[in-house]
Amino acid sequence: MSDLFDNARPEPSSPQVQWLFVDEAGDPTLFHSSGKPIVNTPGCSRFFIIGKLEVEDPDSLSQALTALRQELLADPYFAGVESFRPDREKTAVLFHAKDDLPEVRYRVFNLLRFAGKTLRFHAVVCDKLALLDRETQQRQQNPRYRYQPDSIYDGLIRSLFAKLHRLADRYEVCIAKRGSKDRNHALQSAIEHAEQDFEQRFGFSRGGKDAWPITISSPQKTVCLQAADYFLWAVQRFYEVRRHPQTSEEIREDRFLNMLWPQIGEIHDLDCGGAHGTFFTAQRPLTLEDRFGSRQKRKKKKL
């Protein structure tokens, strides 16, 4: 994944400190432990997405999300709901779009939408079927070659952070804790590589490593990561096919992403269009027709 940078002009300078919250959706898995490809099969996503949410006032957003969750917990409408039981460690302790009820999601999405320009989201999307093709070719050329998921983290993070987005004097980066220490270290290293790429590409530094303090945290501890999760879930819901429980139709949903689109800075789809992918922005919104074609049909599962 080389040369993953756009040529956009920098956005207006941000305040002295920029707060960035980083999370992922899907996973980088391509193969079963047996070596068999499993992309786009049950339990293995087709797309892998990494996103960063820029938050102007993290304390205010954290307080607003916490207050909303406390309000919902006190609402008798949700009494006895499984996800509201503290021992389940779901909505009772944090918002997580995958686990939250539709009524809860609507309230959270509304809160995020009304935050307006104080939130700005960027993401990089990798189509793992395209990645699988490239990895298969590598294996054919070199039978000893083995796929390294950390290389995907490195490529996506470098693409996400090496662009001319908003500039600041210091960037406080908080990454959602995922898996092993090695995996978290790979994300930290990738951000350091991205800063090196940026300096080589544009000829000036954003402060080097010292300007990019990085912390690893959990969404329960760092509430703004819950907001990042919701933005990522909206993007994932757009890309990933799911089946309607009654009709078995294959569907993608764009309504969640459309709701947040005014706060989307950029979605860089690495495997859509030309060699450098496609940049979906305010000038070129991401639509199902543009991404997947106007003739896309909903297919019923064969019985």
Image (spheres, grey):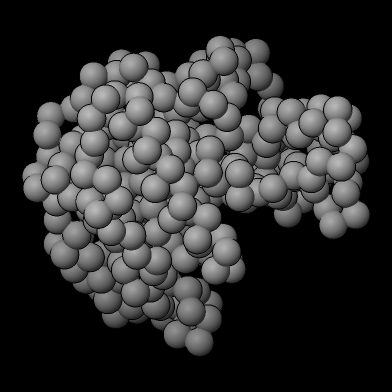
Q: Residue at x 45, y 85 (%)?
A: 86
Between 29 and 214, the one nearer to me in the picture: 214
- In-image side of 96 versus 174 (left or right): right
- In-image side of 5 versus 222 (left or right): right
Q: Quadrant of residue 281?
A: top left
Tell me if residue 199 can be seen. Answer: yes
Residue found at the very far bottom of the displayed protein: 87
Name the spot of residue 1 as percent of width and height, x first.
Answer: 57, 29
Name the spot of residue 28 as percent of width and height, x first.
Answer: 64, 47
99 versus 274 height, above or below: below
Between 155 and 126, the one nearer to me in the picture: 155
Q: In which quarter of the image is residue 123?
A: top left
Q: Residue at x 50, y 39 (%)?
A: 156
Q: Which residue is drawn at 38% across and 21% down?
A: 6
Q: Which residue is drawn at 39% across and 48% down?
A: 192
Q: In which quarter of the image is residue 206?
A: top left
Tell me if residue 78 can be seen. Answer: no
Between 187 and 270, the one nearer to me in the picture: 187
43 versus 240 height, above or below: below
97 versus 296 height, above or below: below
Name the spot of residue 164 as percent of width and height, x first.
Answer: 28, 28
- In-image side of 229 versus 18 (left or right): right
- The quadrant the C terminus occupies is top right
Name the spot of residue 68 as percent of width and height, x first.
Answer: 25, 67
Between 201 and 289, the one nearer to me in the picture: 201
